[in-house]
Image (cartoon, helix red, strand yellow):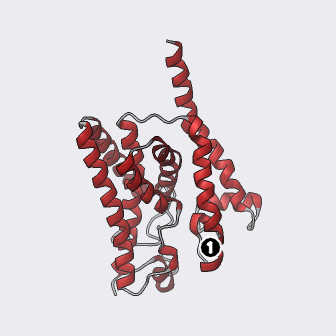
Amino acid sequence: MSEFWYTKTTMNEIAPDYVNFTHFSPIHLFLTAVFIAIIAAAMVFYKKLGEKERQKFLYAMSVLLVADELFKHICSAATGQWEWEFLPLHLCSFNIFVCVYNSLKRDDLSSEVLYATCIPGAALALLMPTWTDLPFWNFMSIHSNSVHVLLLMYPLLLLAGGFRPDIKRIPKVFLVLLCECVPIFFLNKVLDTNFFFLNGTANNPVLEIFEKIFGGEFYFLGMPVLLIFVWAAMYLPWYFLGRKKAKI
């Protein structure tokens, strides 16, 4: 079996010291720039579309996201490497379903969930990828890059189309996250998985910082702290912009 078909587990068993690239290395920065250019071009294109064309574009995005996820499952299962960890129960994977729902309903709450969770989650994954131990030409590496680019692109398209975040919806977004995390916490115990990074840092640099601060068993306490700062940066500009418009 060629390296194209290896999962992280197989690659780590065969070549435990292999590192394809490091964070913020020239190749990583180049890829990030390419991804930003693709997303920016898509936003400009989407903004010029009429409402019906925008709806079709979002449908297509949802189909691509589902197809991307299925690509991972089919390839890993066909090569006998599928594992419970591949279930679409990570935060980003959950947002695939939110994107599908949003493309059908286009309601404010699902748009808010995508803005508040999908943008920071997908952006962090691309800035601090955990698949650096896989070759670029590898199905898991291709999937990891493409699915996070699509997940980052979708809510940014909503912004380009006129959606405006509202800080008043944050409690509902937090409730959605809580409803996801509680059952996942117990499922992790049953399946010995690490969905939502609730059972280990998985070599994520940000989570490893929390591990050093709070200790190995309580690293997850840093997540809500980080979320507060991230949401402040994401919502305060909109809040002040709304107040400025109200005064005019």
The answer to whether residue 138 of the structure is visible from this angle is: no
Q: Amino acid at mark 1?
A: Asn
Please name whichever residue, 141 or 198, is drawn nearer the observer in this view of the structure: 198
Please name whichever residue, 22 or 6, is drawn nearer the observer in this view of the structure: 6
Residue at the spot 27% in from the left edge and 42% down from the top edge: 54
Q: Residue furthest front?
A: 105
Please indicate whether residue 15 sits to the left or right of residue 139 in the image.
right
Where residue 235 sits in the image (x, y, percent)? 56, 35
Where residue 185 sits in the image (x, y, percent)? 65, 68
The answer to whether residue 16 of the structure is visible from this angle is: yes
Residue 192 placement: quadrant = bottom right
Above or below, comparing residue 151 to residue 40 in the picture: below
Residue at the spot 24% in from the left edge and 36% down from the top edge: 50
Please indicate whether residue 180 sits to the left or right of residue 97 in the image.
right
Q: Residue furthest top?
A: 248
Crowd class of label 1 (few under 14; some 14 to 19; many from 20; radius 10 Å): some
Above or below, comparing residue 200 to residue 151 in the picture: below
Where residue 85 sits in the image (x, y, percent)? 52, 75
- At numbered mark 1, what does the secondary structure look like: helix, strand or loop? helix
Residue at the spot 42% in from the left edge and 50% down from the top edge: 152
Which quadrant is the N terminus positioned in? bottom left
Residue at the spot 39% in from the left edge and 60% down from the top edge: 147
Total numbered circles: 1
Please indicate whether residue 148 sits to the left or right of residue 223 in the image.
left
Where residue 96 sits in the image (x, y, percent)? 42, 59
Above or below, comparing residue 32 to residue 45 in the picture: below
| Residue corresponding to mark 1 | 188
